[in-house]
Amino acid sequence: MPNSPILLQIRTGRPRQIDGHRTAYGKDPREGAVLATTLGLDGDEVANTRVHGGPEKAVYAYPASNYPLWAADFPQHAARLVPGAFGENLLIDGLDESTALVGDRWRIGQALVEICQPRQPCATFARWFDDPRMVKAMVRNGRCGWYLRVLQQGSMQAGDQLQLEHRPQGAWSIARVAAASYRSPPDRSEMAGLAEAPGLATGWAAWAARTAQSEKPSAKPL
């Protein structure tokens, strides 16, 4: 990778009521250093702990380069398609789903993070745009962003460069994981390979292993 990716923004949020739903989807930009812990960023909270949060969804990163692509696809939402529209914690320039590999370990400021799974679009995402088509669009176009584990706690701030410290052999890109996971019907041999992808979130790997062995795949992990 010729140029180091850059952290453009850090965003955190607390649960609030939006259209009758309690959600922490909306996040505000942060100035200065923000502590990243194994359970997320300082000042960031989760409303629905059943499907959000935890060590393997500690921090959600999203590529800045996806925004103009979304705006081109959905010009009617252009005013909403600004940083924060996808509920991201980290807005990153210079990295996207094709170049972000599961198991990659990046040093951002003092923190060491590891890419571990794609984001799955949910009903809150559709409600944010008041458009259920956005969910299917994210599945189709693969512009999903990715979740990070925090392996070493530490502070980070906007403007930090991302330094790659480790990339496992046989690593799968986020784009490849997403494409394989939404293939219908699933390719069982592909699922067997995905289950062994180094660094993949434990729930995602277990689902891939079950899918590889079953003729009736179960729902993907949330």
Image: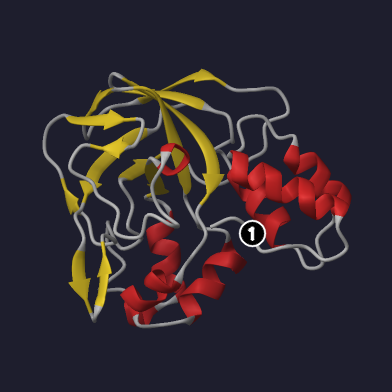
The crowd level at tag 1 (other Cα within 10 Å; few <14, some 14-19, many 20+) is some
Q: Secondary structure at mark 1?
A: loop
- Residue drawn where x is 35% and y is 78% of the image: 127
Say which amino acid is labelled 1: Lys
**Colour logic:** secondary structure
Q: Residue 173 location in percent, x, y?
A: 63, 41
Instruction: From the viewer's perspective, tell me whether residue 23 is left or right of residue 135.
Output: left
Which quadrant of the figure has residue 157?
top left
Q: Looking at the image, is 18 positioned above or below residue 214?
A: below
Q: Residue 24 location in percent, x, y?
A: 26, 60
- Residue drawn where x is 43% and y is 67% of the image: 70
Instruction: From the viewer's perspective, tell me whether residue 6 is left or right of residue 206.
Output: left
Q: Residue 74 location in percent, x, y?
A: 42, 77
Q: Looking at the image, is 136 positioned above or below residue 30?
A: below
Instruction: From the viewer's perspective, tell me whether residue 92 is left or right of residue 197.
Output: left
- Residue drawn where x is 46% and y is 68% of the image: 122
Q: Looking at the image, is 64 positioned above or below residue 7?
A: below
Residue situated in front as seen by the camera: 19 or 141: 19
Q: Outermost residue, left direction?
A: 31
Residue situated in front as seen by the camera: 119 or 140: 119
Q: Residue 15 location in percent, x, y?
A: 21, 60
Residue situated in front as seen by the camera: 26 or 214: 214
| Number of disc labels | 1
Which quadrant of the figure has residue 215?
bottom right
- Residue drawn where x is 22% and y is 35% of the image: 158
Q: From where the camera sits, is residue 179 visible?
A: yes
Q: From where the camera sits, is residue 1 visible?
A: no
Instruction: From the viewer's perspective, tell me whether residue 174 is left or right of residue 60.
Output: right
| Residue linked to disc 1 | 220
Residue situated in front as seen by the camera: 205 or 187: 205
